[in-house]
Amino acid sequence: MDVLAKRLFDWHAWADDLKAFSLDAAAGTIGGVVGIWVGSPFDVVKTRLQTGAFKSLWSCVKTTHAIEGLGGFYRGAMVSSLGQAPNNFLVFGTYGWASRSLDVVNPPDASGVSFLNVYLAGSWSGLLQSVALAPFEHIKVQQQVLGAGRQGAPHPGVAECIKLLSERGGGVGRGLMRGWVATTLRDVPTFGLYFASFEWVKWAYLRSQARRAAEAPSPAKIVNTASVSAPAHAPEVPTWVILAGGGLAGIVSWSLALPADVIKSNIQGSDISTPRSELRFLTVGRRLLAEQGPQAFLKGALPCIVRSVPVNAVTFLVYDTCLRHFTAAASRGAAAAGEPLR
């Protein structure tokens, strides 16, 4: 704690943290927006299945394509991008900042990774992003559900959705923020697992590489035989490891988030004029259980899980690639300005 207290009054540490936050946030923003467009078709199908607009995956895909064309699979993609840009800026920026701060208080072991720190930092970023993302999620779900698969039905744009939610939903704040509690209950625990799963894949790869190096016959090299953990300054991991880590992160987090996501979709996809008393998290959960049974909380599981793999693999790949380029550019700029490279 003394080290952390000293950092609070060290302006060099604050400057370094701000630089690192900006790099993490910028890279995460780009990765998140690219991931949204990759996964939009799966997201549309998931939401329409969860809210009962269609009874089966095939009927949803077939009817949406027949009536709305390919554009139907990108309903809400624009508003999701608008929401994910500042959202991912917040998520990746605060995750990196929280991870570094926690590592000061609770230093990692020889492997260079504390999964407790990773989980706590991820959960913290999930809490912040859930509040920021809720209004964009509400608009997106309304766009995906209104007129779903109905010939000639209107498909409101972003501005029209905001107007409807404001006029009929109890005001801008109350209407737009509907479902924020469900979004928080979905994201806080699962974002910790999201980042922990990704970091575990990288850790496992680096540990296996260290073990191979330790076992390889080479009299010229000096090996610490007491540990086969990843080195403190880990080498760059290959692309396939980043993709695998992102894919696993998506599968793990969304597998556990699905029940809360179903409830959130039903809250945000309900008629705009529905009283708030009927849209509480537990109220909606009990109603779904009574009407449809436990299987209600698995609606949209297939498109959701399938979507999570390419979306998060691409998100982390773009994030990692951008972060390396941004960091290298910042280092070159610091060197050219004669600043110390910390």
Image (tube, rainbow, N blue to C red):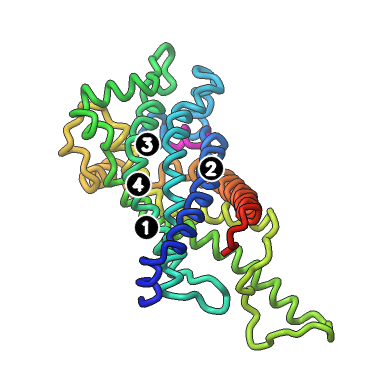
Q: Is residue 78 above or below residue 211?
A: above
Q: Amino acid at mark 4?
A: Ser
Q: Residues within 10 Å of mark 1 (few under 14, many from 20)?
A: many
From the image, tell me which residue sits under label 4: 130
Q: Which contiguous range is marked in magenta?
A: 41-46
Q: Nearer the viewer, residue 3 or 59?
A: 3
Residue 38 sits inside the magenta stretch: no
For marks 2 and 4, give the CA distance: 20 Å
From the image, tell me which residue sits under label 1: 124
Dot 3 and dot 2 residues touching (CB under 8 Å): no
**Residue 317 in sight:** no
Sequence-first disc among 4 and 3: 4
Sequence-first disc among 2 and 1: 1
Q: Nearer the viewer, residue 143 or 302?
A: 143
* Numbered label attached to residue 307: 2
* Numbered label attached to residue 137: 3
Give percent across and percent down for residue 143: 39, 26
| Circle 2 or circle 4, nearest the eye | 4
Q: Nearer the viewer, residue 270 or 238?
A: 238
Dot 1 and dot 4 residues touching (CB under 8 Å): no
- In the image, what residue occupies the spot 68% across and 72% down? 208
- In the image, what residue occupies the spot 52% across and 61% down? 197
